[in-house]
Each structure stands twice: as C-alpha cells, then as structure tokens.
Amino acid sequence: MASVDLELTTFVTRKGATGILLQGFKFRKDHQTSVSINWRCCNPKCKARCKTDIEMKQITSQPSEHNHPKCDSRELDLNDVRSACKRKAVDQPTARASKIICTETKRFQNITIKDMHSIANSIYRERAKLMPNLPKERADIFRVLETYLPEESNLSVLVNDPDI
C-alpha cells in the first residue's frame, strides 16, 4: 500500500478515546488489526473512512468523501478545552471548576461565556461520576455502614423502627 502524505493530528474525544484530525475532519477508531487502524468520520451520518498504520504515523489509504462541511477551529478548540478540563477535574477533585476553566482557556481566544458554562457543567457531571450512588432504601444504608464499621469495633447504629 502506498502511503498518503497528509497532516495527521491526534486528539482525545469527549469520552476519552483517541481520535485523529485529518484535512479538517474528525475521525474515530473503527477497527484495529495487527498492521493498521481503520477510522471512520465522527459525524454519524457520514460514511467517510481512512486507514493508518498501527503507530498512527502515516495514512495508508486516502480518506473517502464526506457529506458535510469541515469542522471549524472554534469547535475543535472547544473540544480540546472541554476534554482537558474533564481530565483535570478527575485528577484534581478538590480544585475549583472556575480555576480549572481559567487555566485551560488561557491559550484560546474564541471561547465565550456560554462555552464556559457548558464546560463547567461537563466538569460537574464528570465529578459526579466519581461519587457513589445515594442509597434508595434503608437497608442499603446499613450495607454501606457495615463496610465502614468492622464487627470487632464497639460501634453500633441505633434505629427506632420495628419494620427493619
């Protein structure tokens, strides 16, 4: 197979997977073999595909035609900032969301206030995934407490409800 000389840039998607940016279009990993990686367009209605070598250094097959316009730089910048903020929010759970957003948006000029609210909400959602679920029933509370209170300790829980 002949390699195609095109500029290939890797990025991290919103869900943490690796993607490539090629000629202004975003591709996600579709299938991987021992010698190559098949990519498809991130737009679900587009059937464009391309193929790279396993190291993602060069493109081994020309991308097929897209049925939509290229991604604008503002959208790409916003995705970069959002994924970086989400990673930092998980790595530094005690850092304030506003501080994370300020440090990450310094390198980009075209981020709006609406975008910052969207990024803050994505940070809060990502941090909420780290928290345990709230108990739905009283029995769930006691199961959780049993993990924190070993049997050999003298601590106990008093409940004034005969239904338990």
Image: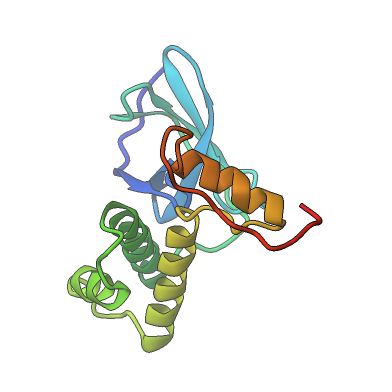
Whether residue 82 is visible here, answered yes or no, is yes
Task: Between residue 111 and residue 139, name the one nearer to us.
Answer: 139
Whether residue 41 is visible here, answered yes or no, is no
Q: Position of residue 70 (x, y in %)?
A: 48, 61
> For the view shown, which residue lies furthest in the right direction?
163
Task: Between residue 79 and residue 117, name the one nearer to us.
Answer: 117
Q: Position of residue 148 (x, y in %)?
A: 45, 43
Against 54, is 74 above or below?
below
Q: Quadrant of residue 94?
A: bottom left
Q: In which quadrant will I find the N terminus?
A: top left
Task: Between residue 114 and residue 64, name the one nearer to us.
Answer: 114
Which residue is painted at 79% across and 57% down in the image? 162
Against 112, is 23 above or below?
above
Which residue is painted at 58% across and 55% down in the image? 133
Q: Position of residue 106 (x, y in %)?
A: 18, 74
Which residue is painted at 46% across and 73% down in the image? 121
Q: Position of residue 52 (x, y in %)?
A: 40, 28
What is the tally of numbered marks visible in this picture? 0
